Amino acid sequence: MELKQVHKYVYLYFAGQTTREQEVILKDYFTQPVVDANLVQFKPYFEAIADERRQNYKGKLAVKPASKTNWRRAVAIAAIAIFGFFMTQINSTQAIQPIPEEIVFEEFKAHMYFVSQKLNKCHEGLAHIGTFNQATNKFINTD
């Protein structure tokens, strides 16, 4: 293997662009006892990766049956959701009922609107009376 090619593979390796075959070539190169002086700094890294790959876990993993726990968890979530739904319904029905002051205010607004309409109608009638008075004053001579 040419040293120039190994330098290129190291650069590609740390850029995350190597193929599996190129990684195997790098692993083989850095497991040799003699490495180029420019690449010595990477040797501990590749040795640590090789050591980690050799390690195996020989113990047993405890696996708990999850069916009962998942069922209980689903029931608890459903109960919380139903409780939350009913709490929002209770709060929304209580918020709709107005207090007595609001009822009185709404009645007052309705009466004031009615009075305003009647006053506007009377104002229009007074405008007609004013024009009637002007027309009659032309024909009636008040000496």
Image (tube, grey):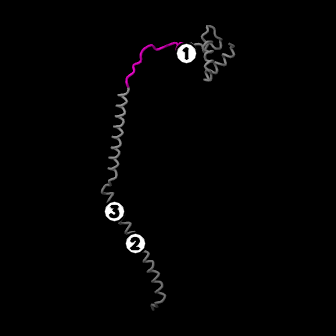
Estimate the spatial distance between the alpha carbons at disc 1 and disc 2, rounded to whole Å. 95 Å
Q: Position of residue 131 (x, y in %)?
A: 47, 81
Number of numbered discs = 3
> In the picture provided, is 115 more to the left or to the right than 139?
left
Estimate the spatial distance between the alpha carbons at disc 1 and disc 3, rounded to whole Å. 83 Å
> In the picture provided, is 133 more to the left or to the right than 36?
left
Label 2: how many residues lie within 10 Å, few (<14), some (14-19) or many (20+)?
few
Instruction: Residue at 46% x, 14% y: name it.
Output: 57
Mark 1 / mark 3, whichever is N-terminal: 1
Which amino acid, by three-letter code, is at mark 3? Glu
Estimate the spatial distance between the alpha carbons at disc 3 and disc 2, rounded to whole Å. 19 Å
Q: Position of residue 21 (x, y in %)?
A: 62, 18
Closest to the observer: 73 or 40? 73
Q: Main secondary structure of the magenta part?
A: loop
What residue does disc 1 label?
A: 49
Which amino acid, by three-letter code, is at mark 1? Ile
Q: Which quadrant holds residue 109?
A: bottom left
Q: Is residue 60 magenta?
A: yes
| Residue found at the very far left of the displayed protein | 100
Instruction: Residue at 60% x, 23% y: name it.
Output: 16
Mark 1 / mark 2, whichever is N-terminal: 1
Q: Position of residue 3 (x, y in %)?
A: 68, 14
Q: Position of residue 96 (x, y in %)?
A: 34, 52
What residue does disc 2 label?
A: 119
What residue does disc 3 label?
A: 107
Q: Which mark is residue 8?
A: none
Which segment did they paint magenta?
48-65
Which amino acid, by three-letter code, is at mark 2? Leu
State whether residue 69 is above or below residue 61: below
| Residue found at the very far top of the displayed protein | 33
> In the picture provided, is 1 more to the left or to the right than 139?
right
